[in-house]
Amino acid sequence: MKKAVFSLLCLTLFIFAQEKIYYEEDLDVKEAYAMMQKGAILIDVRSAGEFVYAGHPLGAISVPIFFYRYEPKDIKLRINFAKKEQTKPLDAHKIYTITPVENKNFIESVKKVRKILGNKAILVICRSGARSKYAANLLAKNGMSEVYNVEGGFLEWKRAKLPFGGE
C-alpha cells in the first residue's frame, strides 16, 4: 500500500508541478482546523481504506479522488511471497498490480456536500498533501470557489495533535 501511495504521489506531483494553481491557497493544519471551527468543510480525498483504517480528522467527509484496482500477480509468486514474508508487513506491490483510477464523481460529490452543508469554504486533505493539491486544483478549475489545500495532510494533522479518529 505504501508503494502504491508513493507511486501515486509521484505521478500526482509530476502532473501538478506542471499545472497552474487555481485554488485559493495552501493552509497549515492549524489554520485549517481554525477554519473548520468557523464552519469550513473538510474533504478527505484518501481512499476509503485509508480514511477508515489509518484514521481521519474528526469532522472530515470522505470523498476519494482516486479508487484503486488491485490485480493479483501470478499465484506461484504469491505463494513464495507468503512463505518468505511471514514476519514482515505486507508490501502489496509484490503480489498485486495496483492501478489508480480517478473518481469520475468526485467534483459532483463535493458539490453535493456543499449544497447540503451550505456554501462554505472547502478544505481538502489527504495523507501528505499531494493528492489534496491535485483535488483542490481540480475543484477550483471546475468553478468551485473558496477551495483550500491542507499542507502536510493527515500526517501533519496527527503530528500537531489535532482531533482525529478511526484508527
Image (cartoon, helix red, strand yellow):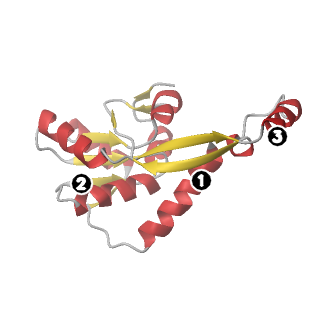
73 or 166, which lies in front? 73
Question: Residue 93: percent from the left, percent from the top?
Answer: 69, 45
Secondary structure beneath dot 1 equals helix
Q: Earlier in the sequence, mark 2 or mark 3?
A: 3
Report the mark closest to the observer, 1 or 3. 3
In the rendered image, the residue lying farthest to the top is: 166
Which residue corresponds to the image point at 29% horizontal and 40% vertical from the top-left?
Answer: 42
Which residue corresponds to the image point at 39% horizontal and 41% vertical from the top-left?
Answer: 64
User: Residue type at mark 2?
Assistant: Val
Question: Residue 5: percent from the left, percent from the top?
Answer: 57, 49
**Residue at numbered disc 2:** 147
Q: Is residue 53 above or below residue 1?
A: above
User: In the picture provided, is 73 more to the left or to the right than 38?
Assistant: right
**Residue at numbered disc 3:** 77
Secondary structure beneath dot 2 equals strand
User: In the picture provided, is 87 more to the left or to the right than 30?
Assistant: right
Secondary structure beneath dot 3 equals helix
Report the mark closest to the observer, 1 or 2. 1
**Residue at numbered disc 1:** 6
- Number of labelled discs? 3
User: Residue type at mark 1?
Assistant: Phe
User: Residue type at mark 3?
Assistant: Leu
Task: Report the Cα–Cα distance between label 2 and label 3.
Answer: 45 Å
Label 1 packing within 10 angstroms: few (<14), some (14-19), many (20+) = few
Label 2 packing within 10 angstroms: few (<14), some (14-19), many (20+) = many
Report the mark closest to the observer, 2 or 3. 3
Q: Earlier in the sequence, mark 1 or mark 3?
A: 1
Question: Residue 97: percent from the left, percent from the top?
Answer: 65, 47
| Residue 149 picture quarter | bottom left
- Residue 149 seen in the current view: yes
Task: Report the Cα–Cα distance between label 1 and label 3.
Answer: 23 Å
